[in-house]
Image (cartoon, helix red, strand yellow):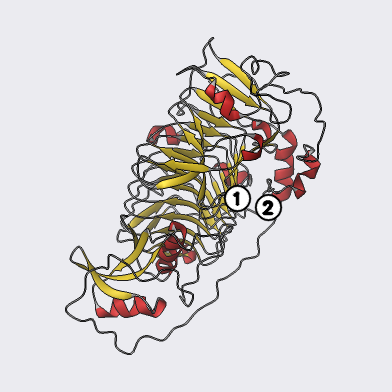
Amino acid sequence: MGKDRKMLPTFVFRKLTYLLPITFGASCLAVLPVTAQNVTLYVNPRIGSDRPELGTNVAAPFKTITYALSRVKSNQPVIIQLADGVYSDNTGEKFPIRLRPNVTLRGNESNKGRDVVVVGGGAWRSPSGFPQNIAIAFSDRSELRGVTITNPQPRGYGFWIDSTSPAIANNTFLDNKQDGGLVTGQSKAIISANQFFRNGTSGLAIEGNASPDIRGNLFQQTTFGMSIRQNAAPQITENTFTQNQNGILIQGNAQPVLRGNAIVNNRDYGLTISGLATPDLGKSNDDGNNNFQGNGTFDLQNVSRNAIAALGNQLDVKRVKGNLQLSNTRQPVSLFANINQQLEQRVATNQPTNFAPNLNVPPVQISAPPQKNASNFNLNVASQANSPFWYEPVTSVIVRIRPRQLNSPIPANPEINASLPPVRSTPPAGEPINQPILIAPLANTSLTPQAPPRYRVVVPVSSPQTVAQVRQIVPNSFASRLNGNLVVQIGAYSDRRVAEGQVMRLSQKGLSAKIEAIKP
């Protein structure tokens, strides 16, 4: 992999093309071979009909993706070509949509699915944990291309990948209640040239032992552009993280490799490292080439227990915090001069980015009779500014918003009783109204109040002074023991995004917190 990384441009962002995915060599991408037996099925929610004799002709399409998938034979290579329109419960879709092996679900890659919109979610029991609500579930060798995905359900995920290795390219993940997508298990998915906007907690979450290849994506206007946790080891290359509350959060024992990313103009922190995480931000003879600048509090902070090396990056050494071993550091190039002009030139070419060129399937030109009643969904691109399903990336310079400073008195008696109770099986009420930790406003805040706590946040401590420091930030926290070790329990939460918000706020205060799952 090190050799492959050296083949990349030394620093692709120097030409100020930051806010759109970057083209790169596809030699390291696994692709699904195209054979003569490939079948194309056509789906159009406006004029289609779910009848077995239809679907093989663009003029006589199926109505739903669900029905088209039911017509696919096991392991048959199939392209399901979607016409412009909205695919939802109202049009007959059944969620989650489960893509079988060798199935490609394709809309319009040239505009990243601007007019091909899948809206909805359904219950899915992940092999790795709790039941989830997701829009798209992937099998090995399945693909998603040129589609917009929105899951408005509580705790809704745009997609969920568990120990499978699909390819996801040139899509938009917008306004998903929980995350744009989650990758877990042993997955080696390829996720390239997508746009993640305004998702609830994370644009993309990576956990378990997953090692996906994440390239050329844009993460924008989300609490965390990307969350990497547990033992995940993704390759994060040439992505842009901007206008999020926080760019990237790396936790647990995660070991991601970051090369050539732009982590710029996020409201609080650019990149935060906590727990026992050991990210590769550049090493000898293999520069990181990441650009950190314009983030609200710090561009790069390490509150983990490890010293982190960061070689060959663009950053201001006065805007970093923690035990960081910096070398070959360059001052960041200004990103925002003439940015609009650069974007206009790029958008004017209107060329799709193909990240799996060996999938040599030409785009299908959809031509169908005009819709008789266009009031349900206006396909005119000019009207998309008023569409609830589409969000145009912001390209102007961002006004930085600094969080309000909160001060609470230190408790009068910070001493710890030598005999501490065990961590409660029924934790104290989470999400208290008077909690002074300021959780960043989320794009979607609808939670289910009656849901039982599923996540506990604790801070390992070694002295009464540390307990006092924690309680200064969270007065209703309490000292306890977990597996024989002294901890301060912050609270228990029904929603992981709230727990992650607490971890992030504590890390900003120099405290390394962790999330413990509460088994039902």
Evaluate whether residue 237 shows in this view: no
Quarter-of-image position of residue 64: top right
Amino acid at pointer 1: Asp
518 is higher (above) or lower (below) than 350: below
Residue 175's disc is: 1
Where is residue 32 drawn, in percent x and y?
Answer: 48, 22
Q: Residue at x 38, y 34 (%)?
A: 1
Q: Is residue 201 left or right of residue 493?
A: right
Q: Residue at x 65, y 23 (%)?
A: 62
141 is higher (above) or lower (below) than 148: above
Residue located beneath label 2 in the image: 394
State which mark lies toward you, 2 or 1: 1
Where is residue 158 drawn, in percent x and y?
Answer: 53, 43
What residue occupies the far bottom of the structure in this picture?
412
Check if mark 2's residue and mark 1's residue have beta carbons within 8 Å: no
Where is residue 469 drawn, in percent x and y?
Answer: 35, 78
Secondary structure beneath dot 1 equals loop
Secondary structure beneath dot 2 equals loop
> 176 and 392: which one is in front?
176
State how many labels appear.
2
Q: Is residue 381 left or right of residue 143?
A: right
Mark 2 vs mark 1, CA separation in Å: 15 Å
Evaluate whether residue 408 shows in this view: yes
Q: Residue at x 58, y 49 (%)?
A: 152
> 367 and 289: which one is in front?
367
Amino acid at pointer 2: Val
Counting residues from the N terminus, which is met first, the one under dot 2 or under dot 1? 1
Where is residue 52 drawn, in percent x and y?
Answer: 61, 17
